[in-house]
Image (cartoon, rainbow, N blue to C red):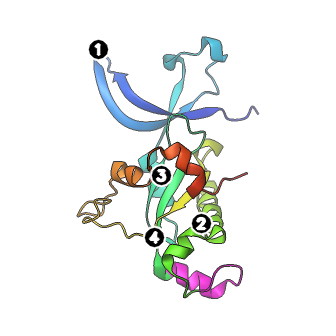
Amino acid sequence: MAPYRGCWSLAERRHDDDHRLVSVTALLLVDLSDCGPAESRTWSSCKEASTSLSSASSTYKTCHYAANLCVHATSESQKPIVILFPHEVHLRELLASNANLPAPDTDLHKLCEDQSVKEFYLRDLQAIAKKNGFKAIEIVQGVVLSPEEWTPESGLVTAAQKVQRKAVEKKYQGANFCSSFLHYVVHDQ
């Protein structure tokens, strides 16, 4: 069996059945496994997988230790990352029962910067993805832990607690999300 080949692609433009342009603002997983050689590949020869960032977010939100999260990928990303606000009560319960992690009374800001905590979250999210049959390209490669609660006042969620993806990405982007990516994220080797 050939390895899965694919990439995240920003689907900004799409044509309907009457060849009229329809605007789309979603990142989709593009399956390149049946597209032929790269030099002859066209957008129309590739199959768009049904996986979008919002459906991936729904699955990753089953993480017991996450209060809220946002899956992020760019067209240059090989795999997505997760920007996550920890569920503090569940995290502290975990810390109390695991000697390899920081003490349960550690400040949340320090916990979000702690390498062992980031690695725990990454492993847990990757296990969720594998359990749910995600393809390798859909499994997160890193995690950004946010110590600030996501509230409507902060603009990161709506009053109905729906994640404002663009606001979350902008907050953790800095000048350039890709360059600050290494600062925040634990990479899966």
Of labels 3 and 1, the one closer to you: 3
Distance from the alpha carbon under mark 3 to that under mark 1: 33 Å
Q: Earlier in the sequence, mark 2 or mark 1?
A: 1
Task: Please give the residue where the numbered disc 1 appears in the rendered image.
Answer: 18
Query: Three-letter amino acid code at disc 1?
Result: Asp
Residue 94 sits inside the magenta stretch: yes
Identify whether 30 is placed above or below 181: above
Q: Which residues are magenta?
A: 90-103
Task: Please give the residue where the numbered disc 4 appears in the rendered image.
Answer: 147
Q: Residues within 10 Å of mark 1 (few under 14, many from 20)?
A: few
Q: Residues within 10 Å of mark 2 (few under 14, many from 20)?
A: many
Task: Please give the residue where the numbered disc 3 appears in the rendered image.
Answer: 71
- The reply to whether residue 80 is visible in this rendering is no
Query: Three-letter amino acid code at disc 4?
Result: Pro
Query: Three-letter amino acid code at disc 3?
Result: Val
Distance from the alpha carbon under mark 2 to that under mark 1: 46 Å
Q: Earlier in the sequence, mark 4 or mark 2?
A: 2
Q: Which mark is residue 121?
A: 2
- The reply to whether residue 135 is visible in this rendering is yes
Identify whether 73 is placed above or below 98: above
